[in-house]
Image (cartoon, rainbow, N blue to C red):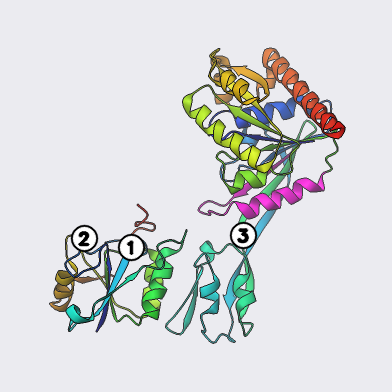
Amino acid sequence: MRLAVLSGKGGTGKTTVAVNLALSWAPYRKTTYVDYDVEEPNGFIFLRPQIRDTSTVFLPYPEINKACTFCGKCSEACQYHALAVVGGKVLVFPELCHGCGTCGIVCPVGAVDEVERPLGKIDEGERDGLLCLQGVLKEGESLAGPVIRGLHRREKEHSSSLEEIIVADCPPGSSCSVIHSAEGSDLAILVTEPTLFGLHDLKIAVGLMREMGLDFGVIQNKDDQGTLIQEYCAQEGITLLGSIPFDLEIAKIYSRGQSLMQDRKWNDLFKTLGERIVTEVKQRKTEGEII
Amino acid sequence: MRIAISTGGCGLDKFVDDRFGRCPYFVFCDSEDPQSTAEYKDNPALSGTGGAGIAAAEYMAKEKVEVLITGSLGPNALRVINGANIPAYTASEDMTLSEAILAWKEGRLIQITEAGAAHAGER
C-alpha cells in the first residue's frame, strides 16, 4: 500500500510522522520511505541511511543549430519564454525551460536540438532494512516536477503489494508538487496542528484530496487537548487517525535529529498509529470492493 | 526615432512605470513628434507566469523600437534588449512620459548597462 503524508501548512510534522511510521513498520513488513519534498528534503537527517546509489535527474532544453531561419515560431510557441528571437539570434534561457519539447515540434526546419542539464538527483539508501529514497532539487532551480516524476518512477521499480508499504513524505502546500507526490496513494495522511493556521491549510488540503478523489484521514500533531481539529473533522465526517501530544521531549529529540522510536513511549505510540493506519486502509479496500 | 516607454497610464501626462516586464502599457511614439504619434499598447508579457522581461524585450524588437525608456531591466530582459541592439535608458516614476522624452532628448537620462534585480517588477 502507498501512503502519502502531507499537510497543507508547513511545519506541522509531516516528516516526523512519515519517518517514525516508516521505522515502526520496517521490522515487520517491507517498507520504503520516499522523501518527495525535493526542495528541502529532511527525512534523511533523521533516518541517516547508508546511501548506496545516487543518480542525476536531467531536464532537456533546446540548442539551436545552423538550420535556423530566425522565423520566431519557437519563441511564439514557448509559454515559458525560454527562447527569444532578436537581432538575427536565438537566445535560449535554460533555467526557464520546462523541457516540454514544443519548440522542436513547431520548428519547420529542424533547427532545434535537445540537450540536457542536470536539475537534481535521487539518492537511494537503507537503514535497518528500511529502503530510503529522496529527491533533491539543485539549489537555485525552481522546477520540482521533473525530479518528483523521476522519484515516482524509481519508487515504482520497487513492488508495492498491499502488504508492503511505501511512505511518501510530500511537500507542504497544495501545488503541483503535492499533487504529483500524492497521486496513486491508497491513503493520504493529512498531518495538522491545532492552530488556526493549521486548520486553515488543512481545509485546503482536504479540498485537494476531495478534488483528487483520494481517500484520506487526519493525524493531529502537537495535540494540546483542545477541540479545534476534532470538531472540524467531526463536522466534515473525516477520520481522525490519531494524535501526537504537544510534548517538550518530542521537540528535544527532534532538535537532535533523532527518531522518536528510540524512546519506548513514542515507539508504542507510532506502532499503534501504524497498525491503525494499515487496518484503516484494508478496511476501506474491503468496503470499496463490497460496494 | 521610435521610442517606447513603460507606463502605468495612457497619456503623455501619465507617469513612467519603472517595471519593464510587468508594466501595464507601453507607449510608442516618434521622439520628434510624440503628441501626434503616440500609440498606447497593452504589455503582452503582463499576464505570463514567468519570463515577462524576456517576452517584453522581444516585443520591443518586434515593434522595431529604437530607444527604450524604463526603470530598470532584469538580467534576462537586458540580455534580449542587448541582443536586439536597442539602447535602454532609465527614468524615474515621478517623470511623466513627456518629461521622460524631453529628458532623453536633452541627454539627461542614463543608459542602462547593468542588470537590476531579477523579478523586481513582481509587486
Q: From what the image shows, is residue B21 above or below residue A132?
A: below
Residue B41 screen position, x and y as percent? 33, 71
Residue B100 screen position, x and y as percent? 18, 70
Dot in front, 3 or 1:
1
Quadrant (top left, top right, bottom left, bottom right) of the N terminus of chain A: top right
**Badge 2 amino acid:** Glu
Q: Secondary structure at mark 1?
A: loop
Q: Specify the segment rendered in magenta.
A: A131-158
Q: Which residue is mark 3?
A: A118
- Confirm whether residue A170 shows in the render: no
- Confirm whether residue A125 shows in the render: yes
Residue A28 sits inside the magenta stretch: no
The circle drawn on residue B24 is: 1
The circle drawn on residue B93 is: 2
Chain to which the residue tagged by mark 1 belongs = B
Identify the mark nearer the N-term, 2 or 1. Answer: 1
Quadrant (top left, top right, bottom left, bottom right) of the C terminus of chain A: top right
Q: Residue at x 43, y 68 (%)?
A: B54
Q: Residue at x 80, y 24 (%)?
A: A279
Chain to which the residue tagged by mark 3 belongs = A
**Badge 3 amino acid:** Pro
Real-space CA distance between mark 3 and mark 1, rounded to the nearest whole angstrom: 36 Å
**Badge 1 amino acid:** Pro
Tell me where residue A173 sits by quadrant. Answer: top right
Dot in front, 2 or 1:
1
Q: From what the image shows, is residue B17 above or below residue A284?
A: below
Residue B25 screen position, x and y as percent? 31, 67
Tell me where residue A36 sits by quadrant. Answer: top right
- Say yes or no: labels 3 and 1 on the same chain: no
Tell me the crowding category of disc 2: few under 14, some 14 to 19, or many 20 or more residues within 10 angstroms, Cα based.
Answer: some
